[in-house]
Image: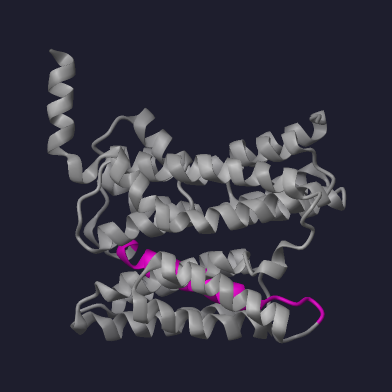
Amino acid sequence: MAHAEKASDMIEKEELSFFQGVKDCIPTLLGYISIGLAAGMIGVASGLSVLEIGLMSLLVYAGAAQFIMSGMFAVSSPATAIIFTTFIVNLRHFLMCATLAPHFSRYSAWRNIGIGALVTDESFGVAAGRIFNGKPINDHWMNGLNVTAYVTWIASCVTGALLSKWISDPEKFGLDFALTAMFVALLVLQLGSVKASKLKHYLTLITLMIVAMYLFSFFLSTDIAVILSTVIVATIGVVTDR
Amino acid sequence: MSVQLSVLLVIIGCSIVTMIPRIAPFLIVRNITLPEPVMKWLSFIPICILTALVAGSVIENEPASFFPDINRQVLAALLPTLLIALWTKSLLATVISGIIIMALLRNFL
């Protein structure tokens, strides 16, 4: 009886099932695979074991941070320095999660923890795109998106670590650029859904962001520049919006 | 295939400091209702942060020089990738083209 009810419930929400989330994750998988392979290879080059690389992907689950951690392990940086740097590099997720969180407040705390723990730049981009387009969003869909990315990431990092004996220069294949290309596409897709009357406002904000990033890069690391520029320009966005 | 204790402890530390900024907003927002201006502010975050991530891949903070460096190779790959994104409006097509463009740039230029 309970099973039958659950089944009919799932048919009703077909549009937003776990599997729809899996499907919506597919276009981003190439980014995870290519960066994951590179992260695994660089981990080995930095003297980490395959198991350590696997644990890093499982527990930290953050592309840029894993590259930086590997680099710092390689030069035997102190533990506190590695942990603090990782914190700064991943702090941008606070802004992303704050953007997504209001759309999940109807679910339990544990469900929210499960969703939040697996938010990445890419899953944020896909979810924010949906929200931006006024489409509905729910926990099953988000979990489908998140879990697909998570499993793919761990598998790619471990595969990269295992392959590193044979392939030493992943950059040669242009794979690292997958991430930037993906951000460009996510940006264009979001702008495509902006009303014509608002487009000029958004293009102004994008220009301001580029200027802010350049200016902050004079004296700040890229990671802090990302956070500060976003906070400032989003505020300008609110003030200048009409 | 082994795990050094010191490495494991750093990984666990990094895990904690990564998970806090990801999870905290979800727990905070469950308990308070955000005012309208904050929601409006949050609506600008996606476009701003995606621009920042793209810009961050081009702008390099070089401690050696006063001016931030522009990575010309990334910039050269970025422009055709942007055109392809505008033209195809497809995530997958853009990513695949971007990788091919970058591979061509690195191997033949």
Q: How many marks?
A: 0
Q: Outermost residue toward the right?
A: A75
Residue plotted at (67% across, 40% down): A56
Question: Would residue B32 be seen by someone viewing this image from the given angle?
Answer: no
Q: Nearer the viewer, residue A104 or A38?
A: A38
Q: Taking B20 as reference, is A231 above or below it?
A: below
Q: Which residues are magenta?
A: B42-64
Tell me, yes or no, if residue B108 can be seen here: yes
Report the residue at 34% width, 73% height from top. B89
Residue at 59 percent of width and 69 percent of height: A177
Q: Is residue A27 magenta?
A: no
- Rendering coords of residue A74 (x, y %): 85, 51
Task: Report x, y in % for residue A157.
Answer: 65, 46
Is the residue A168 above or below the residue A3 in the image?
below
Depth check, front residue: B108 or A29: B108
Residue under the image location 51 percent in, 57 percent down: A30
In magenta stretch: residue B62: yes
Where's residue A58, x and y in %?
60, 36
| Residue A216 vs residue A18, the one in the foreground | A18
Name the side, left or right, on which B2 lies relative to B55.
right
Secondary structure that dominates the magenta span: helix
Q: For residue B9, which quarter of the picture?
A: top right
Q: Quadrant of the C terminus of chain A?
A: bottom left
